[in-house]
Amino acid sequence: MSATFFGHPRGLATLFLTEMWERFTFYGMRAVLILFLVASVSTGGLGLDDKTATAIYGLYTAGTYLAGLPGGWVADRLIGAQRAVMLGGTLITTGNFLLAISASPKGFYIGLLVIVLGVGLLKPNVSAIVAGLYPEGGARLDSAFTIFYIGINIGGALGPIVIPLAQKFFGLRAGFGAGAVFMLLGVLQFYFTRKYLGEAGVRAAPIHALGSDTTLVPRSKEWTRFWIGTASLALVVLMSSAGWIPMDALRLGQAAAYVIAGMAILYFAYYFIFADLTTEERKRGVVLVVLFIGCALFFSGFEQAGSSLTLFAERYTDRMMGWLHFEIPTGWFQSLNSIFIILFAPFFAWVWIALARRKLNPSAPAKFAVGVMLMGSGFLVMAAAAAIVAHGSKVLPYWLLMTYLLHTFGELCLSPVGLSYYTKLAPKRFVGQMMGMWFLALSLGNLVAGLIAGEFDANNVAAMPGQFMHIVYFSVGLGAILLVLSRPVKKLMGNVE
Protein backbone atom coordinates (compact mmCIF):
# COMPACT_ATOMS: atom_id res chain seq x y z
CA MET A 1 0.00 0.00 0.00
CA SER A 2 1.43 3.38 -1.01
CA ALA A 3 1.86 6.02 1.66
CA THR A 4 -0.44 8.85 0.60
CA PHE A 5 -2.01 10.17 3.82
CA PHE A 6 0.47 12.12 5.95
CA GLY A 7 3.07 9.51 5.09
CA HIS A 8 0.73 6.65 6.06
CA PRO A 9 -1.24 4.04 4.08
CA ARG A 10 -4.23 5.48 2.21
CA GLY A 11 -6.46 3.22 4.30
CA LEU A 12 -5.80 5.44 7.32
CA ALA A 13 -7.72 8.22 5.53
CA THR A 14 -10.70 5.87 5.16
CA LEU A 15 -10.71 5.14 8.88
CA PHE A 16 -10.01 8.79 9.79
CA LEU A 17 -13.10 9.96 7.89
CA THR A 18 -15.28 7.08 9.13
CA GLU A 19 -14.54 7.84 12.76
CA MET A 20 -14.75 11.59 12.17
CA TRP A 21 -18.30 11.34 10.81
CA GLU A 22 -19.29 8.84 13.52
CA ARG A 23 -18.10 11.21 16.27
CA PHE A 24 -19.66 14.16 14.41
CA THR A 25 -23.01 12.38 14.52
CA PHE A 26 -22.64 11.02 18.05
CA TYR A 27 -21.53 14.24 19.75
CA GLY A 28 -23.83 16.39 17.65
CA MET A 29 -26.83 14.26 18.56
CA ARG A 30 -25.73 14.12 22.20
CA ALA A 31 -25.59 17.92 22.30
CA VAL A 32 -29.31 18.21 21.50
CA LEU A 33 -30.67 15.01 23.09
CA ILE A 34 -31.37 16.25 26.62
CA LEU A 35 -33.00 19.42 25.27
CA PHE A 36 -35.29 17.36 23.05
CA LEU A 37 -36.28 15.11 25.94
CA VAL A 38 -37.32 18.00 28.20
CA ALA A 39 -38.84 20.21 25.46
CA SER A 40 -42.62 20.46 25.59
CA VAL A 41 -44.73 18.23 23.37
CA SER A 42 -46.21 21.32 21.70
CA THR A 43 -42.76 22.25 20.37
CA GLY A 44 -42.06 18.71 19.16
CA GLY A 45 -40.19 17.37 22.19
CA LEU A 46 -41.11 14.57 24.57
CA GLY A 47 -41.98 16.79 27.55
CA LEU A 48 -40.20 14.67 30.17
CA ASP A 49 -39.24 15.87 33.64
CA ASP A 50 -35.55 16.40 34.35
CA LYS A 51 -35.11 13.24 36.46
CA THR A 52 -36.51 10.98 33.74
CA ALA A 53 -34.72 12.79 30.91
CA THR A 54 -31.30 12.69 32.58
CA ALA A 55 -31.78 9.02 33.48
CA ILE A 56 -32.52 8.23 29.81
CA TYR A 57 -29.48 10.27 28.80
CA GLY A 58 -27.30 8.34 31.25
CA LEU A 59 -28.64 4.97 30.09
CA TYR A 60 -28.01 5.92 26.46
CA THR A 61 -24.42 7.13 26.90
CA ALA A 62 -23.60 4.24 29.24
CA GLY A 63 -25.07 1.81 26.71
CA THR A 64 -22.80 3.02 23.92
CA TYR A 65 -19.73 2.05 25.96
CA LEU A 66 -21.20 -1.25 27.16
CA ALA A 67 -22.14 -2.22 23.61
CA GLY A 68 -18.48 -2.09 22.62
CA LEU A 69 -17.93 -5.39 24.47
CA PRO A 70 -20.36 -7.51 22.37
CA GLY A 71 -19.47 -5.37 19.33
CA GLY A 72 -15.85 -6.42 19.57
CA TRP A 73 -16.89 -10.04 20.12
CA VAL A 74 -19.08 -10.04 16.98
CA ALA A 75 -16.17 -8.76 14.88
CA ASP A 76 -13.57 -11.08 16.43
CA ARG A 77 -15.69 -14.23 16.37
CA LEU A 78 -18.13 -13.84 13.48
CA ILE A 79 -17.89 -11.22 10.74
CA GLY A 80 -14.56 -9.41 10.95
CA ALA A 81 -13.93 -5.77 11.79
CA GLN A 82 -14.65 -4.32 8.33
CA ARG A 83 -18.14 -5.79 8.12
CA ALA A 84 -18.77 -4.78 11.73
CA VAL A 85 -17.89 -1.15 10.91
CA MET A 86 -20.18 -1.17 7.86
CA LEU A 87 -23.04 -2.67 9.86
CA GLY A 88 -22.43 -0.32 12.77
CA GLY A 89 -22.47 2.77 10.57
CA THR A 90 -25.66 1.61 8.89
CA LEU A 91 -27.33 1.09 12.27
CA ILE A 92 -26.24 4.56 13.47
CA THR A 93 -27.68 6.10 10.30
CA THR A 94 -30.92 4.16 10.73
CA GLY A 95 -31.19 5.04 14.42
CA ASN A 96 -30.80 8.76 13.80
CA PHE A 97 -33.36 8.52 11.00
CA LEU A 98 -35.79 6.87 13.45
CA LEU A 99 -35.22 9.69 15.93
CA ALA A 100 -36.06 12.21 13.21
CA ILE A 101 -39.31 10.59 12.06
CA SER A 102 -40.65 8.67 15.07
CA ALA A 103 -44.18 9.75 15.91
CA SER A 104 -44.17 8.21 19.39
CA PRO A 105 -41.79 8.01 22.36
CA LYS A 106 -41.51 4.24 21.83
CA GLY A 107 -40.17 4.75 18.31
CA PHE A 108 -37.72 7.33 19.65
CA TYR A 109 -36.41 4.93 22.29
CA ILE A 110 -36.01 2.18 19.69
CA GLY A 111 -33.97 4.66 17.64
CA LEU A 112 -31.69 5.25 20.64
CA LEU A 113 -31.24 1.49 21.07
CA VAL A 114 -30.35 1.07 17.38
CA ILE A 115 -27.71 3.82 17.72
CA VAL A 116 -26.27 2.13 20.82
CA LEU A 117 -25.89 -1.14 18.90
CA GLY A 118 -24.34 0.70 15.96
CA VAL A 119 -21.78 2.54 18.07
CA GLY A 120 -20.93 -0.73 19.82
CA LEU A 121 -20.13 -2.34 16.46
CA LEU A 122 -18.28 0.58 14.88
CA LYS A 123 -16.31 2.27 17.66
CA PRO A 124 -14.03 -0.54 18.91
CA ASN A 125 -13.57 -2.15 15.51
CA VAL A 126 -12.56 0.90 13.52
CA SER A 127 -9.68 1.29 16.00
CA ALA A 128 -8.82 -2.38 15.59
CA ILE A 129 -8.50 -1.89 11.83
CA VAL A 130 -6.09 1.01 12.40
CA ALA A 131 -3.87 -1.39 14.33
CA GLY A 132 -4.30 -3.99 11.57
CA LEU A 133 -2.73 -1.62 9.04
CA TYR A 134 0.51 -1.74 11.04
CA PRO A 135 1.22 -5.37 11.95
CA GLU A 136 4.78 -4.36 12.80
CA GLY A 137 3.53 -1.98 15.53
CA GLY A 138 6.09 0.55 16.73
CA ALA A 139 6.30 4.30 16.28
CA ARG A 140 4.34 4.36 13.01
CA LEU A 141 1.33 2.86 14.78
CA ASP A 142 1.61 5.48 17.54
CA SER A 143 1.76 8.17 14.87
CA ALA A 144 -1.26 6.68 13.08
CA PHE A 145 -3.35 6.72 16.26
CA THR A 146 -2.35 10.34 16.87
CA ILE A 147 -3.69 11.28 13.41
CA PHE A 148 -6.77 9.11 14.01
CA TYR A 149 -7.37 10.89 17.33
CA ILE A 150 -7.35 14.23 15.51
CA GLY A 151 -10.20 12.93 13.34
CA ILE A 152 -12.16 11.99 16.45
CA ASN A 153 -11.88 15.49 17.85
CA ILE A 154 -12.59 17.26 14.56
CA GLY A 155 -15.86 15.34 14.43
CA GLY A 156 -16.47 16.00 18.12
CA ALA A 157 -15.98 19.74 17.56
CA LEU A 158 -18.02 20.13 14.37
CA GLY A 159 -21.01 17.92 15.26
CA PRO A 160 -22.22 20.02 18.22
CA ILE A 161 -21.96 23.13 16.03
CA VAL A 162 -23.74 21.90 12.89
CA ILE A 163 -26.49 19.69 14.35
CA PRO A 164 -27.80 22.28 16.86
CA LEU A 165 -27.91 24.79 13.98
CA ALA A 166 -30.12 22.38 12.02
CA GLN A 167 -32.33 22.04 15.08
CA LYS A 168 -32.45 25.82 15.59
CA PHE A 169 -33.51 26.68 12.04
CA PHE A 170 -35.51 23.62 10.95
CA GLY A 171 -37.08 22.18 14.10
CA LEU A 172 -36.20 19.91 17.01
CA ARG A 173 -36.08 16.69 15.01
CA ALA A 174 -34.07 18.18 12.14
CA GLY A 175 -30.87 17.78 14.16
CA PHE A 176 -31.32 14.01 14.22
CA GLY A 177 -32.01 14.02 10.49
CA ALA A 178 -28.79 15.94 9.90
CA GLY A 179 -26.94 13.34 11.97
CA ALA A 180 -28.37 10.57 9.78
CA VAL A 181 -27.25 12.34 6.60
CA PHE A 182 -23.68 12.92 7.77
CA MET A 183 -23.32 9.38 9.12
CA LEU A 184 -24.53 8.11 5.76
CA LEU A 185 -21.67 10.06 4.15
CA GLY A 186 -19.27 8.27 6.47
CA VAL A 187 -20.72 4.86 5.59
CA LEU A 188 -20.60 5.54 1.84
CA GLN A 189 -17.00 6.75 1.88
CA PHE A 190 -16.02 3.67 3.92
CA TYR A 191 -17.78 1.36 1.46
CA PHE A 192 -16.19 2.89 -1.64
CA THR A 193 -12.67 3.24 -0.21
CA ARG A 194 -12.40 0.08 1.92
CA LYS A 195 -10.20 -1.46 -0.81
CA TYR A 196 -7.36 0.62 0.63
CA LEU A 197 -7.60 -1.31 3.90
CA GLY A 198 -6.28 -4.48 2.32
CA GLU A 199 -6.78 -7.53 4.51
CA ALA A 200 -6.92 -5.56 7.77
CA GLY A 201 -10.10 -6.55 9.58
CA VAL A 202 -11.55 -8.56 6.70
CA ARG A 203 -11.87 -11.88 8.50
CA ALA A 204 -12.79 -12.92 12.00
CA ALA A 205 -10.00 -14.48 14.03
CA PRO A 206 -9.82 -18.30 14.20
CA ILE A 207 -11.57 -19.69 17.29
CA HIS A 208 -9.37 -22.05 19.27
CA ALA A 209 -10.39 -24.45 21.98
CA LEU A 210 -9.61 -23.26 25.51
CA GLY A 211 -5.95 -23.91 26.25
CA SER A 212 -5.12 -24.95 22.69
CA ASP A 213 -3.41 -23.10 19.85
CA THR A 214 -4.23 -25.75 17.27
CA THR A 215 -7.73 -27.12 17.91
CA LEU A 216 -10.31 -25.03 16.04
CA VAL A 217 -13.89 -24.62 17.26
CA PRO A 218 -16.73 -24.59 14.68
CA ARG A 219 -17.95 -21.05 14.12
CA SER A 220 -21.54 -22.32 14.02
CA LYS A 221 -21.51 -22.51 17.83
CA GLU A 222 -20.68 -18.81 18.01
CA TRP A 223 -23.46 -17.97 15.56
CA THR A 224 -25.89 -19.92 17.74
CA ARG A 225 -24.90 -17.81 20.74
CA PHE A 226 -25.26 -14.67 18.66
CA TRP A 227 -28.77 -15.49 17.49
CA ILE A 228 -29.86 -16.47 21.00
CA GLY A 229 -28.63 -13.11 22.31
CA THR A 230 -30.24 -11.21 19.43
CA ALA A 231 -33.57 -13.01 19.87
CA SER A 232 -33.51 -12.31 23.62
CA LEU A 233 -32.91 -8.59 23.03
CA ALA A 234 -35.66 -8.44 20.40
CA LEU A 235 -38.08 -10.20 22.76
CA VAL A 236 -37.39 -7.70 25.56
CA VAL A 237 -37.91 -4.77 23.15
CA LEU A 238 -41.20 -6.23 21.87
CA MET A 239 -42.51 -6.93 25.38
CA SER A 240 -41.53 -3.43 26.51
CA SER A 241 -43.19 -1.85 23.46
CA ALA A 242 -46.36 -3.82 24.17
CA GLY A 243 -46.35 -2.65 27.79
CA TRP A 244 -45.89 -6.14 29.22
CA ILE A 245 -42.64 -5.04 30.85
CA PRO A 246 -43.08 -1.68 32.63
CA MET A 247 -40.17 0.64 31.87
CA ASP A 248 -39.25 3.29 34.45
CA ALA A 249 -36.11 5.07 33.22
CA LEU A 250 -35.06 6.26 36.67
CA ARG A 251 -35.39 2.85 38.32
CA LEU A 252 -33.80 1.17 35.33
CA GLY A 253 -30.85 3.56 35.52
CA GLN A 254 -30.40 2.92 39.24
CA ALA A 255 -30.62 -0.84 38.75
CA ALA A 256 -28.20 -0.71 35.80
CA ALA A 257 -25.65 1.16 37.93
CA TYR A 258 -25.72 -1.64 40.51
CA VAL A 259 -25.49 -4.28 37.78
CA ILE A 260 -22.46 -2.65 36.13
CA ALA A 261 -20.75 -2.15 39.49
CA GLY A 262 -21.50 -5.80 40.31
CA MET A 263 -20.00 -6.90 36.99
CA ALA A 264 -16.80 -5.04 37.86
CA ILE A 265 -16.62 -6.56 41.34
CA LEU A 266 -17.19 -10.08 40.00
CA TYR A 267 -14.61 -9.69 37.25
CA PHE A 268 -11.90 -8.38 39.57
CA ALA A 269 -12.75 -11.15 42.07
CA TYR A 270 -12.25 -13.69 39.28
CA TYR A 271 -9.05 -11.93 38.20
CA PHE A 272 -7.46 -12.09 41.66
CA ILE A 273 -8.75 -15.54 42.69
CA PHE A 274 -8.82 -17.68 39.55
CA ALA A 275 -6.49 -16.07 36.99
CA ASP A 276 -3.32 -17.75 38.30
CA LEU A 277 -1.48 -14.47 38.73
CA THR A 278 2.08 -14.01 39.86
CA THR A 279 2.80 -11.85 42.91
CA GLU A 280 3.87 -8.99 40.64
CA GLU A 281 0.69 -9.28 38.57
CA ARG A 282 -1.45 -9.21 41.72
CA LYS A 283 0.21 -6.00 42.86
CA ARG A 284 -0.38 -4.40 39.49
CA GLY A 285 -3.97 -5.65 39.62
CA VAL A 286 -4.54 -3.53 42.73
CA VAL A 287 -3.44 -0.51 40.71
CA LEU A 288 -5.89 -1.46 37.96
CA VAL A 289 -8.72 -1.48 40.53
CA VAL A 290 -7.69 1.97 41.81
CA LEU A 291 -7.59 3.36 38.27
CA PHE A 292 -10.99 1.78 37.50
CA ILE A 293 -12.58 3.51 40.49
CA GLY A 294 -10.88 6.81 39.67
CA CYS A 295 -12.03 6.62 36.05
CA ALA A 296 -15.66 5.86 36.92
CA LEU A 297 -15.85 8.65 39.49
CA PHE A 298 -14.14 11.16 37.20
CA PHE A 299 -16.56 10.57 34.36
CA SER A 300 -19.56 10.71 36.69
CA GLY A 301 -18.66 14.40 37.03
CA PHE A 302 -17.16 15.05 33.61
CA GLU A 303 -20.22 13.71 31.79
CA GLN A 304 -22.47 16.31 33.40
CA ALA A 305 -21.55 18.15 30.19
CA GLY A 306 -24.43 16.71 28.20
CA SER A 307 -27.01 16.80 31.00
CA SER A 308 -26.93 19.26 33.93
CA LEU A 309 -24.47 21.67 32.28
CA THR A 310 -26.46 21.65 29.03
CA LEU A 311 -29.65 22.44 30.94
CA PHE A 312 -27.77 25.21 32.80
CA ALA A 313 -26.65 26.66 29.47
CA GLU A 314 -30.20 26.52 28.11
CA ARG A 315 -32.01 27.98 31.11
CA TYR A 316 -29.61 30.21 33.02
CA THR A 317 -26.99 31.47 30.54
CA ASP A 318 -27.31 34.68 28.55
CA ARG A 319 -26.39 33.40 25.10
CA MET A 320 -27.33 36.48 23.09
CA MET A 321 -24.58 38.07 21.03
CA GLY A 322 -26.15 41.51 20.94
CA TRP A 323 -23.95 43.03 18.28
CA LEU A 324 -24.83 40.14 15.93
CA HIS A 325 -28.43 39.77 17.10
CA PHE A 326 -27.74 36.03 17.31
CA GLU A 327 -28.38 33.61 20.17
CA ILE A 328 -25.68 30.99 20.62
CA PRO A 329 -27.28 27.52 20.29
CA THR A 330 -27.00 25.63 23.58
CA GLY A 331 -25.41 22.63 21.88
CA TRP A 332 -22.40 24.69 20.77
CA PHE A 333 -20.96 24.48 24.27
CA GLN A 334 -20.53 20.72 23.68
CA SER A 335 -17.90 21.45 21.03
CA LEU A 336 -15.61 23.18 23.53
CA ASN A 337 -14.15 19.96 24.93
CA SER A 338 -12.97 18.72 21.53
CA ILE A 339 -11.66 22.16 20.56
CA PHE A 340 -9.70 22.41 23.79
CA ILE A 341 -8.29 18.90 23.30
CA ILE A 342 -7.05 19.81 19.80
CA LEU A 343 -5.45 22.98 21.20
CA PHE A 344 -3.93 21.63 24.41
CA ALA A 345 -3.24 17.90 23.90
CA PRO A 346 0.16 18.60 22.22
CA PHE A 347 1.11 20.81 25.16
CA PHE A 348 0.24 18.13 27.72
CA ALA A 349 2.14 15.50 25.71
CA TRP A 350 5.17 17.82 25.70
CA VAL A 351 4.88 18.44 29.45
CA TRP A 352 4.89 14.71 30.31
CA ILE A 353 7.95 14.12 28.11
CA ALA A 354 9.76 17.16 29.54
CA LEU A 355 9.05 16.05 33.11
CA ALA A 356 10.16 12.49 32.33
CA ARG A 357 13.51 13.75 31.05
CA ARG A 358 14.01 15.46 34.40
CA LYS A 359 12.73 12.36 36.24
CA LEU A 360 9.80 14.40 37.57
CA ASN A 361 7.00 12.75 35.61
CA PRO A 362 4.08 12.07 38.02
CA SER A 363 2.92 8.48 38.39
CA ALA A 364 -0.36 7.34 36.84
CA PRO A 365 -2.23 7.51 40.21
CA ALA A 366 -0.89 11.04 40.77
CA LYS A 367 -2.06 12.14 37.31
CA PHE A 368 -5.47 10.61 38.06
CA ALA A 369 -5.59 12.58 41.31
CA VAL A 370 -4.76 15.84 39.53
CA GLY A 371 -7.35 15.07 36.83
CA VAL A 372 -10.11 14.46 39.39
CA MET A 373 -9.25 17.65 41.29
CA LEU A 374 -9.27 19.70 38.07
CA MET A 375 -12.70 18.30 37.29
CA GLY A 376 -13.83 19.32 40.78
CA SER A 377 -12.43 22.82 40.33
CA GLY A 378 -14.63 23.17 37.23
CA PHE A 379 -17.69 22.64 39.43
CA LEU A 380 -16.37 25.29 41.83
CA VAL A 381 -16.74 27.70 38.91
CA MET A 382 -20.27 26.38 38.34
CA ALA A 383 -21.14 26.87 42.02
CA ALA A 384 -20.13 30.54 41.73
CA ALA A 385 -22.19 30.88 38.52
CA ALA A 386 -25.17 29.18 40.17
CA ALA A 387 -24.95 31.63 43.09
CA ILE A 388 -25.41 34.49 40.62
CA VAL A 389 -28.38 32.68 39.06
CA ALA A 390 -29.90 32.11 42.51
CA HIS A 391 -30.00 35.89 42.95
CA GLY A 392 -32.12 36.25 39.82
CA SER A 393 -29.61 36.99 37.08
CA LYS A 394 -28.43 35.00 34.10
CA VAL A 395 -24.69 34.47 33.67
CA LEU A 396 -22.45 35.05 30.68
CA PRO A 397 -21.08 32.07 28.70
CA TYR A 398 -17.57 32.60 30.11
CA TRP A 399 -18.47 30.63 33.23
CA LEU A 400 -19.26 27.52 31.20
CA LEU A 401 -16.21 28.09 28.99
CA MET A 402 -13.93 28.10 32.05
CA THR A 403 -15.65 24.99 33.45
CA TYR A 404 -15.18 23.06 30.20
CA LEU A 405 -11.53 24.20 30.01
CA LEU A 406 -10.78 22.87 33.51
CA HIS A 407 -12.65 19.63 32.77
CA THR A 408 -10.65 19.16 29.56
CA PHE A 409 -7.39 19.67 31.46
CA GLY A 410 -8.59 17.01 33.89
CA GLU A 411 -9.44 14.66 31.03
CA LEU A 412 -5.99 15.14 29.46
CA CYS A 413 -4.41 14.18 32.79
CA LEU A 414 -6.58 11.11 33.22
CA SER A 415 -8.01 9.56 30.06
CA PRO A 416 -4.94 9.03 27.80
CA VAL A 417 -2.88 8.05 30.86
CA GLY A 418 -5.49 5.53 31.98
CA LEU A 419 -5.70 3.89 28.56
CA SER A 420 -1.92 3.63 28.37
CA TYR A 421 -1.42 2.18 31.84
CA TYR A 422 -4.29 -0.29 31.50
CA THR A 423 -2.38 -1.88 28.61
CA LYS A 424 0.96 -1.68 30.46
CA LEU A 425 -0.18 -3.05 33.83
CA ALA A 426 -2.37 -5.90 32.61
CA PRO A 427 -0.73 -9.27 31.85
CA LYS A 428 -0.50 -9.76 28.08
CA ARG A 429 -3.10 -12.53 28.19
CA PHE A 430 -5.58 -10.10 29.82
CA VAL A 431 -4.99 -6.89 27.86
CA GLY A 432 -8.16 -7.24 25.77
CA GLN A 433 -10.30 -7.97 28.81
CA MET A 434 -8.81 -5.07 30.73
CA MET A 435 -9.61 -2.69 27.88
CA GLY A 436 -13.16 -3.97 28.22
CA MET A 437 -13.03 -3.11 31.92
CA TRP A 438 -11.84 0.41 31.07
CA PHE A 439 -14.93 0.87 28.90
CA LEU A 440 -17.02 -0.62 31.72
CA ALA A 441 -15.69 2.13 34.00
CA LEU A 442 -16.65 4.74 31.39
CA SER A 443 -20.10 3.19 31.14
CA LEU A 444 -20.60 3.28 34.90
CA GLY A 445 -19.41 6.89 35.08
CA ASN A 446 -21.78 7.99 32.31
CA LEU A 447 -24.72 6.25 33.95
CA VAL A 448 -24.04 7.77 37.37
CA ALA A 449 -23.61 11.17 35.71
CA GLY A 450 -27.17 10.99 34.40
CA LEU A 451 -28.52 10.03 37.82
CA ILE A 452 -26.63 12.88 39.52
CA ALA A 453 -27.94 15.38 36.96
CA GLY A 454 -31.48 14.32 37.82
CA GLU A 455 -31.03 15.66 41.35
CA PHE A 456 -30.90 19.26 40.08
CA ASP A 457 -34.37 20.78 40.45
CA ALA A 458 -35.27 23.54 37.99
CA ASN A 459 -37.89 24.77 40.49
CA ASN A 460 -35.34 25.13 43.29
CA VAL A 461 -32.59 27.31 41.88
CA ALA A 462 -31.51 28.37 45.38
CA ALA A 463 -30.28 24.83 46.06
CA MET A 464 -28.13 24.69 42.94
CA PRO A 465 -24.93 26.32 44.33
CA GLY A 466 -24.89 23.84 47.21
CA GLN A 467 -25.45 20.90 44.86
CA PHE A 468 -22.50 21.93 42.71
CA MET A 469 -20.40 22.37 45.88
CA HIS A 470 -21.24 18.80 46.94
CA ILE A 471 -19.61 17.63 43.69
CA VAL A 472 -16.61 19.87 44.47
CA TYR A 473 -16.19 18.46 47.98
CA PHE A 474 -16.50 14.89 46.79
CA SER A 475 -14.21 15.14 43.74
CA VAL A 476 -11.51 17.29 45.34
CA GLY A 477 -11.59 15.08 48.44
CA LEU A 478 -11.31 11.96 46.30
CA GLY A 479 -8.45 13.54 44.35
CA ALA A 480 -6.65 14.37 47.58
CA ILE A 481 -7.02 10.77 48.79
CA LEU A 482 -5.67 9.48 45.46
CA LEU A 483 -2.75 11.88 45.72
CA VAL A 484 -1.90 10.65 49.22
CA LEU A 485 -2.15 7.04 48.03
CA SER A 486 -0.22 7.66 44.81
CA ARG A 487 3.18 6.88 46.31
CA PRO A 488 2.29 3.45 47.82
CA VAL A 489 0.23 2.63 44.74
CA LYS A 490 3.20 3.58 42.55
CA LYS A 491 5.31 0.99 44.43
CA LEU A 492 2.78 -1.70 43.46
CA MET A 493 3.41 -0.85 39.79
CA GLY A 494 6.98 -2.14 40.01
CA ASN A 495 9.10 -1.02 37.08
CA VAL A 496 6.18 -0.01 34.84
CA GLU A 497 6.62 3.59 33.66
Image (cartoon, rainbow, N blue to C red):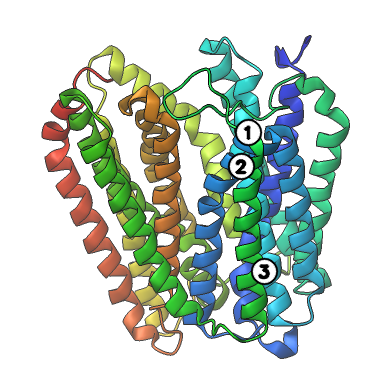
Whole-percent x and y of residue 126?
A: 65, 35
Q: Amino acid at mark 1?
A: Pro
| Quadrant of the snapshot with the N terminus | top right
Alpha-carbon distance for marks 3 and 1?
67 Å
Q: Amino acid at mark 3?
A: Gly
Look at the picture and state if 241 lies above or below 260: below
Could one spot residue 196 in this view of the protein? yes
- Residue placed at 44% from the left, 30% from the top? 210
Q: Amino acid at mark 2?
A: Lys
Look at the picture and state if 162 lies above or below 11: below
Mark 2, secondary structure of its residue: helix
Location of mark 3 (residue): 322
Location of mark 1 (residue): 218
Q: Quadrant of residue 493?
A: top left
| Label 1 CA crowd tier, 10 Å (few <14, some 14–19, many 20+) | few
Alpha-carbon distance for marks 2 and 3?
64 Å
- Residue placed at 49% from the left, 18% from the top? 213
- Residue placed at 65% from the left, 27% from the top? 129
